[in-house]
Image (cartoon, rainbow, N blue to C red):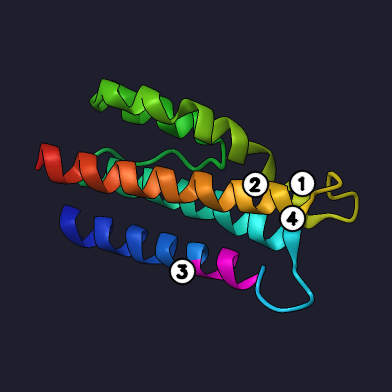
Amino acid sequence: MSVGNLFDQWLSKAEDDLTMAKRALRGKNKIVWSACNHSQQSAEKVLKAFLASKGIPPERTHDLLALNHACVSSDPEFLFLNDFCRVLNPYSVHVKYPAELGLTLSDAKQAIKAAEEVRSFVLRRVEATS
């Protein structure tokens, strides 16, 4: 599979996750945990897309800080994303279980914003380094 094709596939899945995160907050019955989880998943896949664009096989992990560390190895500008990764990291797995961390609508909105920041940054860096 070509590097460009793999990048596009990761990015497409990341876009789907971000769409689902936003949909989870529509209407009367907002699903806060789902918005948080899909936001984390979107950021994870965008970081993996960047690594794929550089021909670096992404580690099989949900740890955004570990993935971002791999990105920093290729592009030091990725240090900028560490705070966003810290916001999103807790939402990878634990939110799927009954004791869901007591999340609020504010947490979900912050998660979506963080995922959007990761996405925008990665797309700018891919364009700048291509």
Instruction: Please provide percent x and percent y for residue 129.
Output: 12, 37
Distance from the alpha carbon under mark 2 to that under mark 4: 17 Å
Q: Quadrant of residue 11?
A: bottom left
Q: Residue at x 74, y 60 (%)?
A: 32
Q: Residue at x 77, y 78 (%)?
A: 28
Of 116 and 52, the residue lying toward us: 116
Which residue in the structure is indicated by mark 4?
105
Distance from the alpha carbon under mark 1 to that under mark 2: 6 Å
Which residue in the structure is indicated by mark 3?
16
Which residue in the structure is indicated by mark 1?
94
Are circles 4 and 3 on residues that touch, CB within 8 Å? no
Q: What's the amino acid at mark 2?
A: Ser
* Residue stretch in magenta: 19-24
Distance from the alpha carbon under mark 2 to that under mark 3: 16 Å
Of 53 and 113, the residue lying toward us: 113
- On-image quarter of the N terminus: bottom left
Q: Callout 3: helix, strand or loop?
A: helix
Q: Quadrant of residue 118?
A: top left
Distance from the alpha carbon under mark 4 to that under mark 3: 21 Å
Q: Callout 1: helix, strand or loop?
A: helix
Q: Callout 4: helix, strand or loop?
A: helix
Q: Residues within 10 Å of mark 2 (few under 14, many from 20)?
A: some
In the displayed structure, does residue 93 sit left or right of residue 59? Answer: right
Q: Residues within 10 Å of mark 1 (few under 14, many from 20)?
A: few
- On-image quarter of the C terminus: top left
Q: What's the amino acid at mark 3?
A: Asp
Distance from the alpha carbon under mark 1 to that under mark 3: 21 Å
Single out the mark in the foreground, 4 or 1: 4
Which residue in the structure is indicated by mark 2?
92
Q: What's the amino acid at mark 1?
A: His
